[in-house]
Amino acid sequence: MNTPALTELLFKMADDQLILGHRNSEWTGFGPLLEEDIAFSSMAQDKVGHSQALYELLHNLGQPAPDEVAFLRPAGQFHNCIFVELPNGEYDFSLIRHFLYDTAELIRFDLLRKSSYEPLAQLAHKIHGELRYHTLHANTWIKQLGTATEESISRLQHSLAFALPYALGIFERSPWEKELAADGIFEGEEVLQERWRTNVEEVISQTDLTLPAWNTIAPVLGGRQGKHSEHLSPLLDEMGEVFRIDPTASW
Amino acid sequence: MKPTPATSRDVYTWLEAVKDPEIPVLSLVDLGVITDVVVENTTVDIEMTPTFVGCPALDIMKQEITETLLQRGMTEVRIVVNFRDPWSSDKISEKGRRALKEFGLAPPLPAKVFTDLEVLEHVSCPRCEGTNTTLKNVFGPTLCRSIHYCFDCQESFEQFKPL
C-alpha cells in the first residue's frame, strides 16, 4: 500500500468534510425556514462525523489523533478545496454549493466503495448511503427553486456562475493520481469530474438554469496544496477556539 | 458451586436492557448495532457499528454497555467500533420495528426499495396506517429520522429512515 498517496487522499477528503460541515453548522438558527435550518444542521453533523471517521483512518496510518489534526493545524496544512471554505453568503449560494459539492462527494464515495484499501472501502460504503440523503435534499431544492420565480431563478443562476470555478477546484489533481489508480485505491479526479459533469447537467437540465460551456470556466486551484483564501484562517480560529484553551482537557 | 460461565447468548440477553438513548423503546440488540460478541471467562469483546457515522449517541451507548455488563459480573468489556458489517435499517429486528411503531415512529422501509424520494413520499402513518401522507423533510430531529405529514390524521410524524 502506498501510504503517502493514501494519506494525501484521506486528508483532502477529511478536511473537505470538516470545513463544509462547519460552514453548514453556521446555518443552525439562521435557516430561511425551520426545515432548512434542520437540514443544514443535520448535514453538518453527518459531515463532521465523516471527517472524524476519515481522521481515524489517518490516525491508524500514524497521523496524530483526530482532535489534534482537526483543531491544531494552521490553514497552510489544510487540504480542503477553497470551495468549501467560502463563507455561506446568501442561502442561494449555500444551496448551489451544497448541490455541486455533494454531487461530487456521492460519486467519490461510490468509487471508493471499490477501493483496494479495505478500511476505506468499508467506510465509503457507509458514507455513500448517508450522502444519498444529502443529494436528494439538494436536487429537490435545485429543481424546485430553479423553476419557481424570477427571483429564485436569477439568484441561483448568479450563484451558479460564481460557484462553478471554485467547484472545479474540487478536482484539483493529486501528485499521486497514477499511484492511486495503479494500486486500486481510487480511480482518480478525472474519472470523478467526468461523472460529476454528467450528473450536474442532468439536474440543471430539469430547471430554468443554464450552464456555461465547461471549457470557459477557469478552475480555482490551490486548496489541495494548502494555498487558501483569506476565509479559512478565521474559520479555523473560531472552530478550534475552545479546544485550544486546554488541548489536554477530557470531555 | 462454581457459576456457569457466561455465553455470548447471555450477553445479548443482558444487552436487551441497553436502549438507544435517542429512541428509549429500542434496545441496541433490536437496533442491530451489535455486530459481534465474544466471551471468554469474564472478559467480553464487543464489536459494534453506528447507525450513522456521525451518531452522537455512540459514546453513551458504549458507556451503558460497559456498565450493564460489569453489573452482570463481567470484569472486562472491550468495545471496538468499525464498519466491517455496516449498519443498515434492515438490521432492525421485527420486535424493534413493532417497538418503533408503538413509539410513534414509522419503521423504515426495506433499504433496497429506497432508490429515490418517491419511495419516501407515502410512508405509512404510524397512527392510522394510512398512506395519504407526504414527506416534509428528509432530515429530522436526529440523523436517523425524517419528517412526514399525514393528511388523514392532520398531524406530522417521523420515520426511522431507510439506510
Image: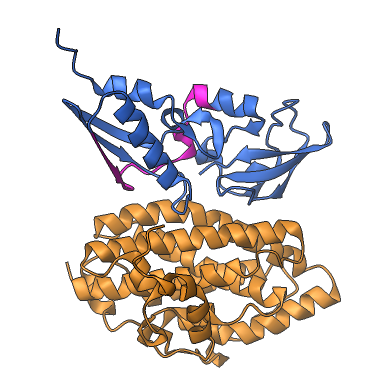
Chain colours: A orange, B blue
For the N terminus of chain B, the image quarter is top left
Residue A195, position as x, y percentages in the image? 47, 69
Residue A57, position as x, y percentages in the image? 29, 61
Specify whether residue B116 is in view: yes
Q: Name which quarter of the figure residue A222 lies in.
A: bottom left
Classify B10 as above or below B20.
above
Give the total of numbered labels: 0
Residue A44, position as x, y percentages in the image? 55, 63
Answer with left or right where residue A5 lies relative to residue A162: left
Answer whether residue B88 is magenta in the image: yes
> Which residue is found at the position 69% from the left and 45% from the top?
B147
> Which residue is found at the position 52% from the left and 67% from the top?
A21
Q: Name which quarter of the figure residue B114 lies in.
A: top right
In the image, which residues are magenta?
B76-96
> Which residue is found at the position 48% from the left and 86% from the top?
A233
Residue B76, position as x, y percentages in the image? 22, 35
